[in-house]
Amino acid sequence: MILHLLLDPLQYGFMQRSLMIAICVGLVCALVGSYLMVQRLALLGDAISHSVLPGLAIAFLFGVNILIGAFIAGVLSTLLITWIHTRSPIKEDAAMGIVLSAFFALGITLITIIQKDTKIDLMHFLFGNILAVSANDVRDTVLITIFIIITIVALYKELLFYSFDPQGAQAAGLPTNALNFGLMVLIALTVVASLKAVGVILVISLLITPGATAYLLVPRLHHVMLLGSGLSILSSITGMYLSYYYNLPSGPAIVLVITGFFTLSLLLSPRHGLLYQAFKLANKQ
């Protein structure tokens, strides 16, 4: 019975493609999101994810691959945030908020204008539509995933040092500006890879929640990345099956599953679980 439930959806090509993208997205979001969580830059991930929207609209308007437009807009937003922060007394979090809202508003405006002449579903950009992915979407997502994994493996020690001690990394002679920009590029690529699965609104959840869940359970960054990736992949696959069997929107279903794992971790983790700590305290008394 269980085997039938697992295998039945796989007879359809759209489910095979969707599951491949779900696995890739779950993996890269957890890996890149772990660095965001360590550096306390969750808002940056949110800013970049919302900032890709005008790039999507402009690329669609000119008949270019929307992933290219999204990536360019994401990188441009990070450069603009850095420019505002370094050239003015405005703090980085304020700069993120300004750029996030401006880019997002521009994207909504452009899509609204385009909708007057062309049928374009805004909801798919905002919340994803993983069940409608094509073979080209799978190819693009797999290539982005491979690039991100290779980059993280190659620069793991440097990114680890920079994430925990930026000033120490600079004193040690590491190219901190290049590492920072490289991390921004990885975030932008991760957002682009996740667009079809969860859209620009929900991608921040996949970037942050798996790493946060793992952080409550294990102490070291590489453990957080591995466990977070496993939980994120499991959540993506589970969300897909829930979407298939219960006719739920796929992106929100994936996000709700990983949020459920986080809630269990927050309550029951032996390291930081609220209920577990309360139980230990009650036993001591």
Image (spheres, helix red, strand yellow):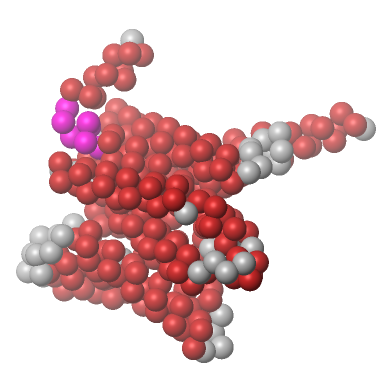
Please provide the residue range marked out in magenta.
12-18
Q: In which quarter of the image is residue 60?
A: bottom left
Left or right: where 36 falls relative to 7? right
Left or right: where 211 falls relative to 247? right
- Residue 250 belongs to the span the image colors magenta: no
Q: Main secondary structure of the magenta part?
A: helix
The quadrant of the image that shows the N terminus is: top left
Residue 70 vs 16, above or below: the answer is below
Residue 238 appears in view:
yes
Left or right: where 14 falls relative to 161? left
Residue 112 appears in view:
no
Q: Whole-percent x and y of residue 104?
A: 33, 71
Residue 47 vs 200, above or below: the answer is below
Residue furthest out toward the left: 117
The quadrant of the image that shows the C terminus is: top right
> What residue is rendered at 79% in x and 32% in y?
279
Left or right: where 174 falls relative to 199? right
Q: Whole-percent x and y of residue 152?
A: 44, 50
Residue furthest out toward the right: 285
Q: Whole-percent x and y of residue 160?
A: 57, 54
> What residue is rendered at 12% in x and 69% in y?
61
Residue furthest out toward the top: 1
Residue 102 vs 6, above or below: the answer is below
> What residue is rendered at 26% in x and 47% in y?
143
Q: Quadrant of residue 164?
A: bottom right
Residue furthest out toward the front: 173
Work out whether residue 38 or residue 150 is closer to the camera in this orientation and state it: 150
> What residue is rendered at 37% in x and 73% in y?
77
Q: Whole-percent x and y of residue 213?
A: 57, 42
